[in-house]
Amino acid sequence: MSDKLAEYRRGETPIPEKDRLWPLYGAGLENMGVEAKPITVETPTYGPDELLVRHDACGLCFSDIKVITLGEKHPRIFRDIKKEPIVLGHEVVMTVVGVGENLKDKYKLGDRFIIQADIYVKGVNYAYGYMIQGGLSQYAVIDQRILNGDDGNYLIPIQEKTGYAESALVEPWACVIAAYELKYRTALKAGGTTWIIGTTSAPREQPLTIGAGFSNESHPNRLLLSNVPDGFSDWLKAQAQKLGIEVVEVADISSPPADKIDDIVILGSDADVVEMVSPKLADHGIVAIISTTPFERKVNIDVGRIHYNDWVYVGGHGPDIARAYSDVPVRSTLKPGGSVWFAGAGGPIGRMHVQRAIEHANGPSAIVCTDVSDARLDDLCVTFGEEARAKGINFVCLNPMKKDEYAAGMAQFKAGFDDVVVLAPIPPVIADCATHLAPQGIMNVFAGVARGTTAALDLTDVFARQTRVIGHTASTIDDMRLMLQETESGELSTNRSVAAIGSLEAARDGMQALKDTTYPGKVVIYPNIKYMPLTALSELQEKMPTVYARLKNGREWTVEAEEEFLRLMLP
């Protein structure tokens, strides 16, 4: 290792008087920077309870594009950014280059960290790269909001040997692995509010009951009843009296006396009722449909709130309503040895899902990847196809725009998929994917569709075939720690996601490339290197042959390639 790189890693390089960064002054890429360039400001000073950090690498995320599109209308931005611009960049790795007097017993120069971006202080979100200056800058101050927030310290230490890009990309990867770590209730929410609604098609073959979750061991605190058949209503009221549960009769289901209801149990298959009452669900709420007759039409379901609010729909035939929750618990992991379809697999996040499915223990036996871009799909197949087939996985790549080839490829999965992961935020695509689920199959709406976005789903499947639709967004600090552990142990390589690199000056072009879906993988910016335009890894063969020689298979970023790159590019 060169002296310059060793000194850089130790955090001992001289701190410049000036700092460069990309401010965002409003909605639109034209408002990023000044005259399409970063600006120069005084290097920030830090106090006795603060750290000065150097941003070493920063991944660009489609969430950044959402902020650029919305400006201060974005829900995580709550200030006038024309007067107080923000600096994006939450997929970031940093090195401590200055330690406040009161923190010298805990930190030292050269300490390296990634950060859980969702920072809360007294319930207020000060996300890194949103309200707090992010990674598209050379230097930043880490203050007590980060070191002592609602969840403690949001910094996560990394090992000395871990690369910069692979550390920065732990954050988006954590969002991916978090999708397979979701946990759902298997009973009515203890201490919550349950609403039971009868319809004209309510099951009447045998008396209904509720077993687990409605007993001394666990039960809701409040019970709302609407049009519940007399016999079941009498049983519920008698049981509620024994358990000390408040009972409220709700005559008008359009206006229940609660805005956030944890469990909504619908007796029968009435699409109008499901559509009317679903918006009353609380976060992590569950709708349980108890029926023996199919719905007469598809139901418009808010898939945005499935994604962002963790709603889920379950179902059963009765007579024990509790079994709708517990007979087929909601599964978030891919079914071992099963079949999985990644719809919209060609983008950076889709590739992460595909890579994880191949590399993870107890993975699927069949993987179908679909994308409307031949270039992305071809690159995906070249990158992962041989590896998947070497593990005995039936690996299929299909472009739905090529209708004959697509139909022929999907025909071998007539029985349906055990898992469908939707990576395209398009309601008709989501609705179509749901029709391809096998019995007890799971569809994960991973794509970030906005709250209020509906898709027409056949909810008959939730009780007749016991399929489930789940969703996911973001990650927790525990998810990031888990992903970092898997990265540093070699279980999952985040470096495989890198597609293009550049210096700080290239960040705006990187955002444009992200909007234009130019690259199949991630763009990584190195804020403290010499000028370098946005460069695909394949271009390094001509531009930086010694770096290219250290790529894996001439395609994948490595720690060794990064070290050589920094030897050449550090000022």
Image: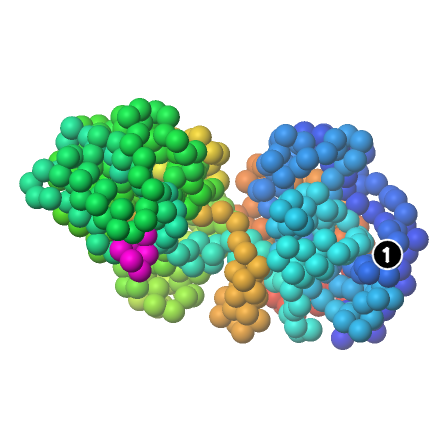
- Residue 393 in view, yes or no: no
- Visual colour scheme: rainbow
Q: Residue at x 29, y 51 (%)?
A: 243
Judged from this view, the residue extending furthest toward the left is 205
**344 relative to 501 in the view: left or right:** left
- Residue 285 lies, in percent from the top left, at 38, 44
Which amino acid lies under the numbered mark 1 shown in the image of this protein?
Tyr
Considering only vertical position in the picture, is 481 above or below 179? below
- Residue 61 in view, yes or no: yes
Q: Closer to the camera, 413 or 194?
A: 194
Q: Closer to the camera, 372 or 490?
A: 490
Query: Could you classify mark 1 by the number of other residues whose Cα lies within 10 Å: few (under 14), some (14-19), or many (20 or more)?
Result: some
- Residue 254 lies, in percent from the top left, at 34, 25
Q: Closer to the camera, 415 or 502?
A: 415
Q: Secondary structure at mark 1?
A: loop
Judged from this view, the residue extending furthest toward the right is 17
- Predominant secondary structure in magenta? loop
**24 relative to 511 in the view: left or right:** right
Q: Closer to the camera, 437 or 482?
A: 482
Q: Residue at x 43, y 33 (%)?
A: 259
Reading the image, the residue beneath label 1 is 46
Q: Residue 398, located in which quarter of the rendered image?
A: top left
- Residue 263 lies, in percent from the top left, at 33, 43
**426 relative to 318 in the view: left or right:** right
Q: Residue at x 41, y 34 (%)?
A: 258
**119 relative to 390 in the view: left or right:** right
**Magenta run includes residue 488:** no
Q: Residue 310, located in which quarter of the rendered image?
A: top left
Q: Residue at x 87, y 43 (%)?
A: 40
Q: Report the span colored magenta.
A: 213-219
**Magenta run includes residue 215:** yes
